[in-house]
Image (cartoon, rainbow, N blue to C red):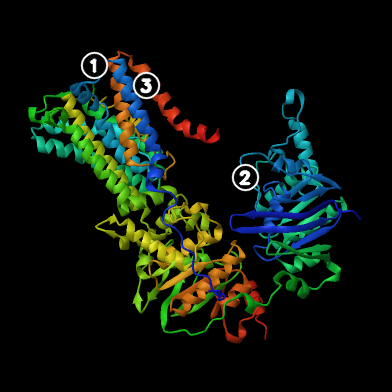
Amino acid sequence: MTAPVTKPAPRIVADRLHSPLRRALRSWEAILLVVAIAVFIGNTLLSPYFLNAWNLSDATFNFTEKAMIAFAMAMLIVAGEIDLSVASIIALASTAMGLAMTAGAGVPVIVLVGIGTGLICGAVNGVLVAGLGLPSIVVTIGTMSLFRGIAFIVLGDQAFTGYPPEFAYFGQGYVWWVISFELVLFAAFAVIFWAVLHRSTFGRAVYAIGNNATAAAFSGIRVQRVRFILFLLTGVMSGVAAVCLTSRLGSTRPSIATGWELEVVTMVVLGGVNILGGSGTIPGVVLAAVIMGMVTFGFGLLNVPGIVMSIFLGALLIGVIALPRLLRRG
Amino acid sequence: MQPVLRLRGISKSFPGVKALQGVQLDLYPGEVTALIGENGAGKSTIVKVLTGIYQPEEGTIEIDGRGVRLTSADAAARAGVTAIHQETVLFDELTVAENIWLGHAPRGRFGLIDRRAMREGAARLLAGIGAQIDPGARLGDLGIASRHMVAIARALSIEARVVILDEPTAALSHKEIHELYDLVEKLKRQGKAILFISHKFDEIFRIADRYTVFRDGQFVAEGRMAEVTEGALVQMMVGRSVDQIFPARVHNVGAPVLTVAGYSHPTEFADISFTLHRGEILGFYGLVGAGRSEVMQALFGITTPSKGACRVDDQVRVIRSTAEAVDAGIVYVPEDRGRQGAVKGLPIFQNVTLPSLGAVSRAGFLRMAEELALARDYTRRLDLRAAALDQDVGLLSGGNQQKVVIAKWLATRPRVIILDEPTKGIDIGSKAAVHAFMAELAAEGLSIIMVSSEIPEVLGMSDRVIVMREGRIVDEVSGERMTPETLVRAAAGLAVAA
């Protein structure tokens, strides 16, 4: 019992510092959940029309399309990149769908053309950033003008209308009762992106690159390939959003989805993704999407002008970001 | 004679490291005191204490007999302490005068910057150190030597009583070094107290009047240069013989594992050929900039060699990316831990599994339990000190971060592990642990390349040493010839002693 110990046994390092529950309670997502509940209660108290299944269902259209892009954008921003051309990709994809429609294509072809255009646009961004090593913020500001510019050249002040009636399902159809096709698609993508970012080897590479791209490369991660795939993915999701939005509006104008890139980035940042890369979660983005959708809808019910709405969203964004820092200081 | 600066009982610690333990230091007017010690002895920490970057936990600092608190870089400057670093940060787009006065420019009416006083002051300072530089020139247009003079003028632009020269000759040519010696003489005549930090003994003996020796964060000795010999100083620095610090190794090397033939690079290195055997530790020695790290990074796929071939276990391997190097069984623990080693912001276990994601996943999806198990195995082998495996790796001390990086590579079960300055800047305890572990790995049959600039480490750990100079292999040393003198002479390009 008192024998001298010559070599101490290696110390045991615990797996976790805190229990998963404690981590969850202290997380950004917990704050967002509280905000979401507060917005919900506020809306219910302020407007008698809010708590109605069909009204709530309508409210989801305020965020479903943007959120689909936001999931891909979240991964891109976690990896330390950004894509500001997403709204312009929608414009170009929608224009391409309109051209396909005028050429007499059926619904499946129109959808494929929309998603395919997104893929090509994503590939252009990806080659410029990952292939040539250009900074993504500059590249995508460039392609933002470029893609929408092409849409304007094709359409001028015209619009494509007269999509086939079956095409309307993507943006206007309901799967069951008040559950729209877009809402189902949003939920499905939320699960898929959650699994990819938080449970796959690809997602782990994304976090490693966002925290330290050099060290990631020195760890055998194919950094440029991951970056390229992320731009491709964002392009595809913009194409999917273009299909839904075009279907919902039933027409294509070159000004379609103007300003969405900033709303998508706002959604991602509000969701707790560090704009400098390295951290953030998909559940956070889901909550941020719901909050933004409900705020927009609630203000709509109260007849609040659009400009007040954007002031509120801006203040909300700055508030939620400043709050943890102020609390830590105090 | 009363010292200008008097430090007593200064202690400073960092998580896991006691950088300084009750050290003392005296600097006298008009005299140069050389601060001598091995890497990690606490020299840079004391400089940072004196320049107000670190606050010591204990101890007193007196200047001209009055106690001072150097709570910021600004406070240190006002107390009259200035430092000339190896790489002072200057601004290319500003003029010479603006660089010199940045942050403490002379003010004129309405508190505006007095540009005339600035130009005249800059001209006076530059003339004082014998530099013929136009104060109005844009800094970016100057050569390296002139920039260095501007940095010195900037350091002297505060009314300094104490001037610290922190390895000032590291990046200088022969001629510039002599100009620096002249400058030091001028500063001495002005009665400034000078602290001189250098690894080069010839310099120390030439320039210093006094010495102070630190070892492992502790004060060892001080005295006059005239009363000490080189051998005695080395003894004080090291304080123990080489075989005491390094683990005893059985030199038992096996069949060739890695064969490099004629590796060349357009600018960094040429005609590198060597063979590494099973269970061997092959040391790479050379001066900083000899191209050792560049060769290793080419073997690891960070850069691509223009010529040459590489074989692992008799199989030709073309390595164009780090992923291909890892596939070939070659892994690399970089010197620049902060930038290239650990991914700070990710937890420890995710750092460990980063190159082994394929092994801890099914169909691209990670298995948390397997990840933790792998991380647990390898961090335990390295005796990692951490609170938990899900702790951010950035919170660990340098030595423990290094253990995480080594664990990450061992988890890939490599054939060859390249360690680039594996113990640079880590504490003594972790250093011994890394050395012991290297010996253990070699005994198990792993082949190790160790790039190191510390002669005791190279000699203490290696079976064989390759010396590089200016991008080429100049000598290969083993057995009887493994002496400090052989290595130093080969690295410096001197004739090999008979």
Residue B185 coordinates in the image, percent (x, y): 83, 56
Q: Marks 3 and 1: in contact by CB < 8 Å?
A: no
Q: Is residue A119 above or below residue A215?
A: above
Label 1 Cα crowd, 10 Å radius (few <14 / some 14-19 / many 20+): some
Residue B168 coordinates in the image, percent (x, y): 71, 57
The kind of residue tagged 1 is Tyr
Q: Name, please, the residue furthest toward the right.
A: B1
Residue labelled with disc 1: A49
SS at circle 1: loop
Relative horizontal placement of residue B98, taking residue B314 as reference (left or right): right
Residue A224 coordinates in the image, percent (x, y): 36, 52
Relative horizontal placement of residue B297, taking residue A198 as reference (left or right): right
Residue labelled with disc 3: A310
Question: Quadrant location of residue B324?
Answer: bottom left
Label 3 Cα crowd, 10 Å radius (few <14 / some 14-19 / many 20+): few
Residue nearest the observer in this picture, B199 or B428 = B428
Q: Marks 1 and 2: in contact by CB < 8 Å?
A: no
